[in-house]
Amino acid sequence: MLEVKDLHVTVEGNEILKGLTLTIKKGEVHAIMGPNGAGKSTLSAVIAGKDGYEVTQGSITFEGKDVLEMEIEERAQAGLLLGFQYPVEIPGVKNIYLLKSALNAQRVARGEEEMSAPEFLKLVREKLDYMKMDPSFLQRAVNEGFSGGEKKRNEILQMLVLQPKLAMLDEIDSGLDIDAMKVVADGVNSLRAEERAILIVTHYQRLLDYITPDKVHVLVDGRIVKTGDAELAKELEANGYEGIEEGSAA
Amino acid sequence: MATEEMEQLVTREYKEGFVTDIESDTLPPGLNEDTIAFISNKKGEPEWMLEWRLDAYRQWLKMKEPSWAHLDYPPIDYQAISYFSAPKRPEDMLQSMDEVDPKLLETYEKLGIPLHERAALAGVAVDAVFDSVSVTTTFKETLLEAGVIFCSISEAIHDYPELIKQYLGTVVPKNDNYFAALNSAVFTDGSFVFVPKGVKCPMELSTYFRINEANTGQFERTLIICEDQAEVSYLEGCTAPMRDENQLHAAVVELVALDDAYIKYSTVQNWYPGDENGVGGIYNFVTKRGDCRGDRSRISWTQVETGSAITWKYPSCMLRGKDSVGEFYSVAVTNGRQQADTGTKMVHIGEGSRSYIVAKGISAGRSDQSYRGLVKIGPRAKGARNFTQCDSLLIGDTCGAHTFPYQEINNSTATIEHEATTSKIGEDQLFYCQSRGISEEDAVSMIVNGFCKDVFQELPMEFAVEAEALLGVTLEGAVG
């Protein structure tokens, strides 16, 4: 589904990713772990199309299409969705309005009809319940005055409503207490499906206690240095990244 | 998105820019006492009105054009402007719609303002002012049954001279400022509203100003009076054809609210802004002032300013009455080469008077915008309160936004709050929306509308939608 080949990315002249290769198939859950500054967030940002990242070498394809040639919104419309570590506030724009605009923009781009208001409300209420969020969230301005936990839940809510083919979650566990983490993990688990893939970027292993990945990649200094299954995450928790780095160098 | 891309400007279309081909009586350019006598005579005005105009003119001659605003434009040649232009029609006043030139009806139809009462916007009465004259006023009879007078100011001078003598020029004196003095001398038409004691006006009232003729200025005069416990909601809209020369619009609006009266005055200003290189467009020099004369009276200004090459405008409130309330809600959008210096004055005279100011400025392209606001608390205004919120949003990095707040506090019991923010339209906000599948253009419009929401919700329902759409048109292509 997603093919990243020999990806080199520079930010303001500094090379952050130095030849990253990654393949994600339908139905799989991948976790990318690594120390701070390894380039974890860069990868998801480049896939989503954030400005300021220059791809100097390599390619990203999604379902056979060249992602780097696509506009930001086209990537989302194709089914690539990024959940942010620090979602931005948009004063005056109601959460429900953003959700509805996003959903309908995606539907129209896929040649489907816009969803009717009652149908949409029903869908959103159901997902809201699932995320244990109060309906008043819909009427509040996007992320404005949300606590850290509320912002993260809201990101997952968007995933549940928009149903992407590849859901990318950037440090979705940062700043969450244990209860909020369970709710967020629950939401992510409910996204698991045969035709969908999930990419989790995280610094800590603890989220993976709740979401069991099929594959774990260790990203150090812009490259994936080791790939394994869920057990690898536990190993990292015990030995830290340094052990891996030494191991890979050896 | 890269900053260079954000700078790419401006492909907006000004869809009201057409010219109506209609035969007009247009006075040759030039201004002297004969011009004023001609206007007064053309309108069949009584002698006292002519004297009033001439007095204003003589004072204007001694005045200097103000230069304190943060605006840059070449000197205006007041002798190059025609001060009167009217579509040809029977000399006597129109009796019915059937006598209105069909071309005029068509013009207003095209602007989305049907003038046949049958087709008119439900619940909105309209006075249509075309160049220097009022073409027609709808629902006049219906309103009169409720005791509300709504007609052109020319008619009011004929039919209600006592009210005119009592109120005209009492809020904005003839010599108040350069442009007000000029208006007092040469004003040609505008609207008059009188809501008697205890009456809540049963409809929204609206005046639609249209400049059509080349080389003419439009000098409208509007006077709205609400007696004790009376209420009215009034809206003005304005457009003009696209022309290469600058045209002058110098209006005066006076509002009078007596005890417990409430006047809500909304403006959707969409004068032709000129092209992307700053050629053409309307010079909009306007004096708007409300007088909260009565206790507990309330005057609320809401403005959405999207048009004009130059805007110089400070709708104000004189809060004389005890516990009177003044409000100013403003969204000003500038793009291309537009310049706007706009804001408000809240003058607290009465005890316990309160004022609220919410000003939102959006600058794009190479435009330049200033908020200028005065809050003045007099020595007798015990316990007066003001809240000011002033936010600027910049799109791209070739535009400017400035804030000039003035405060004169002469009473230690006053409470003043001032909040101001300036932000660039967040690339992060844009990226967030786009990464959800929303196109860049829709994302900009979503973010900007969110930014203006506090003000839009003050507009009458019928016009809030129009204002949002207008904002979209003005900012079209503002980000590339």
Image (cartoon, coloured by chain):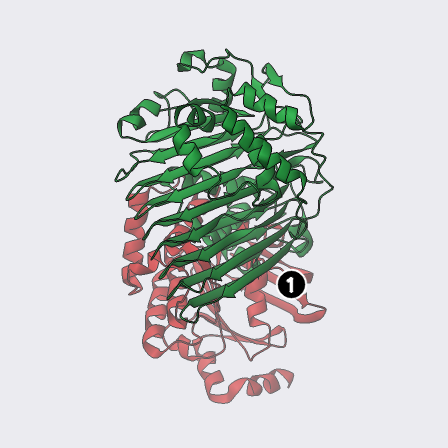
Chain colours: A red, B green
What's the amino acid at mark 1?
Tyr
List x then y, in percent, for residue B470: 51, 39
Residue under the point 34% across and 62% down: A190
Secondary structure at numbered mark 1: loop
**Residue A164 in which image quadrant:** bottom left
Q: Nearer the viewer, residue A160 or B436?
A: B436
Residue under the point 46% across and 37% down: B168
Q: Residues within 10 Å of mark 1 (few under 14, many from 20)?
A: some
- Establish if B359 lies above or below B280: below
List x then y, in percent, for residue A41: 55, 69
Asked whether residue B219 is in view, the answer is no
List x then y, in percent, for residue B404: 59, 59
**Residue B155 in which image quadrant:** top left
Q: Chain of mark 1?
A: A
List x then y, in percent, for residue B18: 59, 25
Q: Nearer the viewer, residue B142 or B478?
A: B142
Specify whether B297 is left or right of A61: left
Number of numbered discs overlaid on the protein picture: 1
For label 1, the residue is A53
Q: Nearer the viewer, residue B415 or B155?
A: B155
Asked whether residue B314 is in view, the answer is yes
Residue under the point 47% across and 55% down: B346
Residue under the point 59% across and 39% down: B181
For the N terminus of chain B, the image quarter is bottom right
Specify whether B459 is left or right of B17: left
Q: Nearer the viewer, residue A70 or B216?
A: B216
- Establish if B394 lies above or below A153: above
